Image (cartoon, helix red, strand yellow):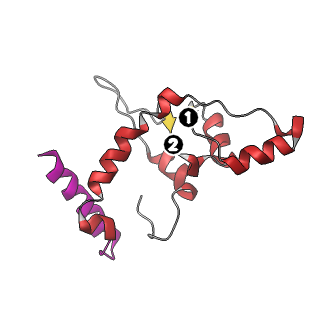
């Protein structure tokens, strides 16, 4: 999903998740629910965590320091801290490296294209060039 460069990613999280289709091994219809979501602190809002819980999608998202402080300040009404698995979170490194390689292409990093269709084509061509 392509948005304006000044807009954040987190508000589009639910729409992106609704568009995901995970292929099944062999044949059959793709799944609409991934096995696990690993995200950074930008996606640690209560709305996103509630959305993932409602869809029964396990997730590994670190808690922001200010959110932890608010939760602790509320005492027992603040609830327990969300679960976090450091080893699973390390798997994000592969994705971050791929995005870093993608941004080495000047057209992708600076987004000179005004139309979303052209920008998506630039990303696709860059991915193809990197896979060769």
User: Which residue is pictured at 41% across the width and 62% down the height?
Assistant: 2
Q: How crowded is mark 2: few (under 14 residues within 10 Å), some or many (20 or more)?
A: some
| 19 sits to left or right of 14 | left
| 103 sits to left or right of 86 | left
- Residue receiving disc 2: 39
Calculate the distance from the C-alpha at mark 2 to the C-alpha at mark 1.
7 Å
User: Which residue is pictured at 81% across the width and 35% down the height?
Assistant: 79
User: Which residue is pictured at 65% across the width and 36% down the height?
Assistant: 54
Marks 2 and 1 close (CB-CB < 8 Å): yes
- Residue receiving disc 1: 60
- Residue 98: horizontal and vertical position, in percent? 30, 46
Q: Nearer the viewer, residue 16 or 61?
A: 61
Magenta stretch bounds? 111-132
From this view, report whether residue 108 is shown above or below residue 33: below
Question: Any mark on residue 52, and which?
Answer: none
Q: Does the magenta stretch include residue 23?
A: no
Q: Nearer the viewer, residue 30 or 16?
A: 16
Q: Which residue lies furthest to the left in this view?
A: 132
Which secondary structure, mark 2? loop
- Residue 45: horizontal and vertical position, in percent? 66, 49
- Residue 15: horizontal and vertical position, in percent? 52, 52
Asked where in the image residue 110 lies, by quadrant, the reply is bottom left
Q: Does the magenta stretch include residue 113?
A: yes
- Residue 35 appearing in the image: no
The mark nearer the N terminus, 2 or 1, is: 2
Q: Which of 30 and 36 is in front in this view?
A: 36
User: Which residue is pictured at 53% across the width and 51% down the height?
Assistant: 13
Q: How many marks on residues? A: 2
Q: Residue furthest top?
A: 26
Query: Which quadrant would the N terminus be assigned to in this image?
Result: bottom left
């Amino acid at each position: 999903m392509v948005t304006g460069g000044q807009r954040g990613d987190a508000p589009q999280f639910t729409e992106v998740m609704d568009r995901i289709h995970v292929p099944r091994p062999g044949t059959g219809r793709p799944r609409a629910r991934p096995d696990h979501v690993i995200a950074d602190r930008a996606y640690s809002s209560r709305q996103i965590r509630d959305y993932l819980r409602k869809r029964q999608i396990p997730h590994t998202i670190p808690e922001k320091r200010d959110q932890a402080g608010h939760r602790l300040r509320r005492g027992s009404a603040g609830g327990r801290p969300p679960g976090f698995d450091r080893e699973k979170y390390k798997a994000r490194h592969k994705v971050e490296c791929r995005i870093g390689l993608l941004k080495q292409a000047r057209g992708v990093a600076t987004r000179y294209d005004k139309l979303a269709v052209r920008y998506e084509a630039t990303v696709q061509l860059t991915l193809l060039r990197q896979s060769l």
